[in-house]
Amino acid sequence: MTTVSNPIVSPEVEKKFMELASLQRKLPEEAMNKVQALQICNLYSYALEHIGDINHRMNEHINSFNGQQGTVLKKIRIVRKDLIRPDYYSLDINSEIVENYKYQKEKHPDTYRFKDLTINQVERILKDASKEYSIEHSKLKVYNHIQWLARESAMALGVFDFKYAKECLDELYDMVEDHDKYLKYIAEFEEDYDQKHRTYVRM
């Protein structure tokens, strides 16, 4: 077994954080894969993939990987850049859904999986699948504020609440950017943090 010279959390806390990281890769990840498999809007599913992965990256083998700051920061930057104007992002998402629908209907009229559906029905399929992504993320137990923010960000994206997602990502970015402060934030632990802090995402 590898011994970590300067662990940032106790073995007991690391075990709980590792469980959070592992659970993120199960039902929440499966829900994200289902959204991607629909191929309705790549811009949107790309955001779900990156933000949903943050709680995995931050908490995976935390005493060895130290929260993978570089990877986490990159994921936040990618999506945060697109969310500079949440209203514009929403328009971009809607535009891609419509354009992809029209293209598939025109180029692949016989094989397009949604060929018999209206654009509104296709949008509903996407939103139902992404809501499931939010629901699965909501089941992850978190133990500190930075984990809570990562979960809120993913849940907000899943229900198309881009304004709140941006607010969460802005705060998250500020917590991740400084290395020393980041190590402090990811090491915080409160067993009943989850019970004391409700979600602000409406599902």
Image (cartoon, rainbow, N blue to C red):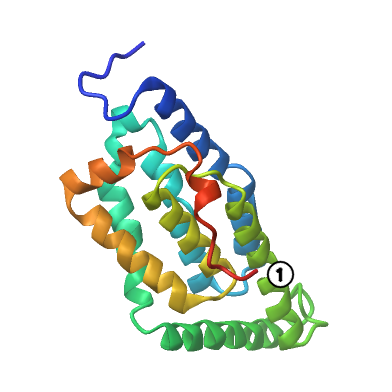
The residue most toward the right is 116
Density class for disc 1 (Cα within 10 Å; few <14, some 14-19, many ≥20) is: some
Q: Secondary structure at mark 1?
A: helix
Which residue is at 21% across, 23% downward? Answer: 6
Q: Please, is residue 98 above or below residue 140 in the view?
A: below
Residue 147 lies, in percent from the top left, at 42, 49
Residue 95 lies, in percent from the top left, at 53, 88
Q: Quadrant of the C terminus?
A: bottom right
Residue 121 lies, in percent from the top left, at 76, 82
Q: Residue 31's image quarter? A: bottom right
Which residue is at 31% across, 28% downward? Answer: 63
Instruction: Please state if 6 lies on the left or on the right of 151 as rendered.
Output: left
The residue most toward the top is 1
Q: Please, is residue 52 above or below residue 202 in the view?
A: above
Count of marks overlaid on the render: 1
Residue 174 lies, in percent from the top left, at 24, 61
Q: Please, is residue 151 above or below residue 80 in the view?
A: above
Residue type beneath disc 1 = Asp
Camera-side residue of 98 and 31: 31
Q: Quadrant of the N terminus?
A: top left
Which residue is at 39% across, 43% downward? Answer: 57
Instruction: Please state if 50 lies on the left or on the right of 117 as rendered.
Output: left
Camera-side residue of 188 and 76: 188
Which residue is at 46% across, 51% downward? Answer: 53
Residue ID for mark 1: 128
